[in-house]
Amino acid sequence: MNEISSIINILFQIYYYMIIIYILMSWLPNLRENFIGELLGKLVEPYLSPFRRIIPPLFGTLDISPIIALFVLRFAVVGLHSIVAMLFG
């Protein structure tokens, strides 16, 4: 069970940091246009886009949907840990 929890934690951390880097890249012009930016966009945008559709930007420009998406991701990981603990006890 510890191995499964470790794998879940590692994958969560990787995806979490991918989202953070993708968000930070949006602050710098043309940074999302390079290979890494496009790769991160292909991996992160499918997860972020439903949140962007539901949560409008504050004051017209402040997009808080990635913050909510990170919270939801964290809750999903906690739930996944609970399911793994119940199954493999």
Image: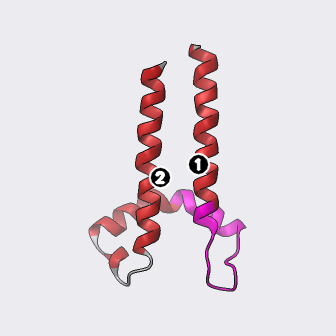
Q: Quadrant of the C terminus?
A: top right
Residue found at x 64% / y 60%: 68
Real-space Cα separation, disc 1 to disc 2, in angstroms:
8 Å
Residue found at x 67% / y 68%: 53
Residue for badge 2: 16
Image height of 13 relative to 59, above or below: above
Q: x, y percentage for residue 74?
A: 59, 46
Image height of 11 relative to 38, above or below: above
Disc 1 crowd, CA 10 A, few/some/many (<14, 14-19, 20+): some
Q: x, y percentage for residue 52?
A: 63, 68
In the image, what residue type sits under mark 2? Tyr
Q: Is residue 6 magenta?
A: no
Q: x, y percentage for residue 12?
A: 47, 43
- Element type at marker 1? helix
In the image, what residue type sits under mark 1? Leu
- Element type at marker 2? helix
Residue for badge 1: 73
Q: Nearer the viewer, residue 54 or 67?
A: 67
CB within 8 Å, label 1 to label 2: yes
Q: Nearer the viewer, residue 19 or 35?
A: 19
Residue found at x 55% / y 56%: 47
Image height of 25 relative to 14, above or below: below
Most distant residue in the left direction: 35
Quadrant assignment, res 40: bottom left
Span shown in magenta: 46-67
Quadrant assignment, res 31: bottom left
Residue found at x 62% / y 41%: 76
